[in-house]
Image: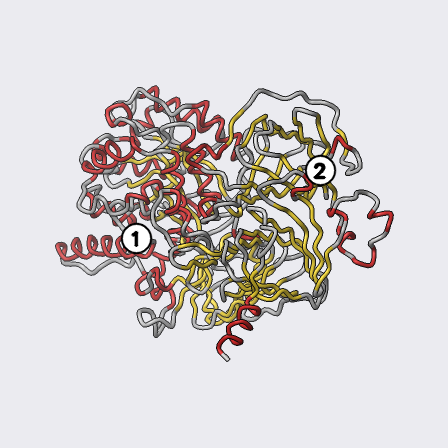
């Protein structure tokens, strides 16, 4: 089914000469791509009204040390020399992988909030192999388009920045390339963030450049900035080593000689300028016009939020003001008019979008609103007091707007900011560092500081990359969301993948959604196929291995919730025997901890003696009430003690009035659409969406369609034998009776 979004009636600045600007135009997005940009489009699509909005390509930040988001503003008065000591030699050595995850996620969300849809993450914080994994995980979860640039460790200024003899570890760079970036077609791509000559010995520089070219990934390097590196002649040294090439981005370039500028241009290199940092911290004048004079297409970058703001509007104005000030001063001294080549407001928008995509090596995918490119789109509220009235749309963006005007942000066809609010989990970065936080998720609520519910849309939680063994798990509900008893997620295992033997100090139940997988436990091996479900009691060693020709996908329920501070309550154990697997048959004593579900089991009219004879357990019985059918799957009968798992189906007239429980519930929607309410907040939920209700959350559901509505539901801890439901209507009745 084609997924379409139509941005209707906005002032479109496409940054594509063949498309042009449309004072009133529509942008159609189909399956993540820009399908059309026209004055008017008619399509069956989700329509976003862009009246009074300026629609532009997303900004591209070509150089940001994203890991520094968590130490924002700690060095407001720092020079570049101060930065090396105060940040790289003081904070950086203390960073754990968890710190990197939290900062990278916060930094990426900050970008999305500001309309930056593509980011080059210059990650020189790889103090252990776990650090790059954490950074990439955060970028993946954010949903931003990013080039992850693997950099050095930063555990000692003397070891890594003063004629360093330590090269970036090639084996780990290869591991990251193989694990996360086997293809260059994903939302995330890879680069190598090198320190370069002057900071490193020549053989280190040569080895790092060779590593990048072996792996066919681009290179990004700081050059010609500040009191020290500004005198290194770094591009000249790279030329002498025979390393210049079109795969290299040169960051800053403030003190390049004329010969070096020519070398960069002749070799096909690209340029990233960080104007606010450069003027403020003493790197040098931002060389935007210098790059243009040599036929280059300079881009803009934020660099460090320890010292400057993290939005592109600041960089646009810093570059625009600094370059025009320099030219105006020179012209005043020479008593001559300013040249026609002066930077314009519109050109600054081009530099912040199309040029950025060019420098990041992604111009074939993003940077302009061109049909066929991926849909990275930003809409700005042009009715706001700081923008209206709009006489020149490009200058309204570059000289008037700010982050508060960024109303809609779309990356790869997925909406990440709607109506001025991020849709992602803005609380997660704070949660990972134990910081007091608001309710989790883009949609959710809390009461008295306690999280009550969570809604996660299918498109808002991107698939994480596979690990080295071909397994990945997408967490939908967990400890960071305020859950105490529930860990719920979606697992996927490639046909050649495996999960090594381990044990948990929690109970794990599961339901196979697609494909087939083999589960090994001490008493045997079991082939689990679509529709099968089961329970792994606490402390039972187990391993998973792929089966068949396609990946297997399953939902899992972990109770109580795994705790990150205790390694997620998981311990590796010795490998288990891999026997010939047994298929699931609930009448077979060997598979007594498993069962099988078919959607037909939810039809009351198809309950037969043959079906009921499969087992004497409640798992084959059907509870039917008020247009609702419930099929129990995992409960105490199957051996569960901490949780339950069951299937729920609503007929077209099915309704459950508002109620709450003394336990947590999770709902993973499989079919149809639901009108749901959680503590007074209403949601329309469909296939792939997930919701969680904490203990005491008042919630209710109704079928919003004409066909069946079905979801997988879990409860933890297990419901008490009495008083597990508290219906609002009953208490309202009692209150009215007592007051009358």
Left or right: where does residue 293 sit relative to residue 191?
left
Q: Secondary structure at mark 2?
A: strand
Residue 128 horizontal/vertical position (percent): 39, 27
Left or right: where does residue 674 sit relative to residue 616?
left
Q: Nearer the viewer, residue 183 or 134?
A: 134
Q: Does residue 264 sit above or below 36 in this rendering?
A: above
Left or right: where does residue 275 sit relative to residue 668?
left
Residue at left offset 23%, top offset 33%:
90
Residue at the limit of the structure toward the bottom, as seen here: 740
Residue 401 horizontal/vertical position (percent): 33, 64
Residue 691 got which mark?
A: none
Indicate which disc, 2 or 1, sits on the residue closer to the N terminus: 1
Residue at left offset 25%, top offset 37%:
87
Residue 432 horizontal/vertical position (percent): 39, 42
- Residue 545, quarter of picture: top right
Which circle, 2 or 1, is nearer the viewer? 2
Residue 594 got which mark?
A: 2
Q: Are marks 2 and 1 in contact (CB under 8 Å)?
A: no
Residue 457 horizontal/vertical position (percent): 55, 55
- Residue 197, quarter of picture: top left
Q: Does residue 71 sit above or below 566 in this rendering?
A: below
The span from disc 2 to disc 1 (Cα, nearest Å) is: 59 Å
Residue 180 visible to the viewer: yes
- Residue position marked by numbered label 1 in the rendering: 315
Q: Nearer the viewer, residue 71 or 224?
A: 71
Q: Which color scheme is applied? A: secondary structure
Question: Alpha-carbon neighbours of circle 2 within 10 Å: few (<14), some, or many (≥20)?
Answer: many
Q: Nearer the viewer, residue 406 or 33?
A: 406
């Amino acid at each position: 089914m084609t997924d379409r979004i139509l941005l209707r009636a906005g002032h479109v600045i496409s940054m594509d000469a063949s498309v042009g600007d449309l004072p009133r135009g529509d942008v159609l997005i189909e399956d993540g791509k820009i399908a059309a940009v026209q004055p008017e489009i008619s399509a069956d699509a989700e329509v976003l009204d862009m009246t009074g909005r300026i629609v532009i390509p997303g900004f591209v930040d070509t150089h940001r040390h994203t890991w520094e988001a968590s130490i924002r503003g700690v060095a407001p008065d720092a020079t570049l020399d101060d930065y090396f000591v105060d940040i790289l030699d003081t904070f950086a050595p203390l960073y754990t992988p968890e710190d990197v995850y939290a900062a990278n996620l916060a930094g990426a969300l900050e970008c999305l909030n500001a309309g930056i849809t593509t980011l080059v993450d210059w990650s020189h914080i790889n103090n252990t192999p776990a650090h790059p994994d954490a950074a990439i995980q955060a970028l993946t979860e954010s949903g931003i388009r990013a080039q992850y640039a693997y950099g050095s460790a930063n555990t000692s200024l003397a070891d890594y920045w003063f004629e360093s003899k330590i090269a970036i570890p090639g084996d780990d760079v290869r591991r990251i390339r193989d694990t996360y970036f086997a293809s260059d077609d994903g939302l995330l791509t890879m680069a190598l963030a090198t320190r370069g000559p002057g900071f490193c010995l020549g053989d280190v520089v040569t080895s790092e450049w060779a590593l990048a070219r072996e792996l066919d990934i681009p290179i990004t390097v700081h050059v010609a900035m500040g009191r020290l590196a500004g005198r290194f002649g770094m591009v000249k040294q790279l030329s002498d080593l025979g390393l210049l090439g079109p795969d290299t981005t040169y960051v800053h370039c403030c003190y390049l000689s004329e010969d070096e500028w020519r070398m960069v241009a002749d070799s096909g290199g690209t340029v990233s300028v960080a104007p606010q940092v450069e003027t403020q911290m003493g790197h040098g004048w931002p060389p935007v016009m210098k790059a243009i004079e040599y036929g280059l297409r300079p881009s803009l970058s934020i660099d460090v939020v320890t010292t400057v703001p993290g939005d592109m509007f600041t960089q646009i104005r810093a570059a625009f003001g600094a370059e025009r000030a320099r030219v105006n001063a020179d012209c005043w001294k020479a008593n001559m008019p300013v040249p026609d080549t002066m930077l314009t407001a519109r050109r600054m928008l081009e530099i912040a979008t199309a040029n950025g995509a060019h420098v990041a090596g992604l111009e074939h995918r993003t940077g302009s609103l061109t049909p066929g490119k991926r849909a990275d789109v930003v809409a700005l509220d042009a009715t706001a007091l700081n923008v209206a009235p709009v006489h020149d749309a490009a200058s309204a963006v570059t000289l008037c707007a700010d982050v508060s005007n960024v109303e809609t942000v779309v990356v790869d066809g997925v909406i990440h900011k709607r109506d001025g609010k991020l849709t992602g989990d803005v609380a997660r970065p704070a949660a990972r560092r134990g910081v007091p936080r608001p309710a989790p998720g883009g949609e959710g609520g809390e009461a008295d500081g306690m999280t009550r519910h969570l809604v996660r849309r299918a498109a808002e939680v991107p698939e994480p990359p596979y690990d080295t063994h071909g397994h990945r798990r997408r967490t939908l509900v967990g400890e960071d969301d305020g859950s105490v008893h529930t860990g719920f997620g979606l697992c996927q295992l490639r046909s050649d993948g495996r999960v090594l033997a381990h044990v948990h100090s929690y109970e794990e139940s599961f339901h196979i959604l697609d494909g087939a997988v083999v589960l090994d436990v001490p008493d045997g091996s079991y082939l689990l196929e679509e529709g099968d479900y089961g329970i792994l009691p606490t402390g039972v060693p187990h391993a998973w291995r792929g089966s068949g020709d396609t990946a297997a996908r399953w939902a899992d329920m972990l109770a109580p919730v795994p705790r990150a501070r205790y390694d997620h309550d998981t311990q590796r154990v010795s490998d288990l025997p891999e026997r010939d697997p047994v298929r699931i048959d609930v009448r077979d004593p060997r598979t007594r901890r498993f069962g099988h579900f078919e959607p037909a089991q939810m039809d009351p009219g198809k309950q037969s003696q043959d079906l009921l004879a499969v087992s004497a357990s409640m798992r084959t019985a059907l509870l039917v009430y008020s247009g609702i059918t419930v099929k129990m799957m995992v409960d105490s009968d199957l051996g569960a003690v901490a949780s339950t798992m069951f299937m729920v189906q609503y007929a077209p007239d099915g309704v459950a009035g508002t109620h709450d429980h003394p336990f947590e519930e999770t709902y993973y929607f499989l079919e149809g659409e639901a009108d749901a309410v959680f503590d007074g907040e209403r949601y329309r939920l469909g296939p792939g969406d997930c919701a969680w209700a904490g203990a005491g959350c008042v919630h209710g559901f109704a079928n919003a369609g004409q066909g069946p509505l079905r979801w997988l539901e879990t409860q933890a801890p297990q419901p008490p034998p009495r008083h597990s439901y508290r219906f609002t209507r009953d208490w309202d009745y009692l209150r009215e009776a007592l007051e009358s």
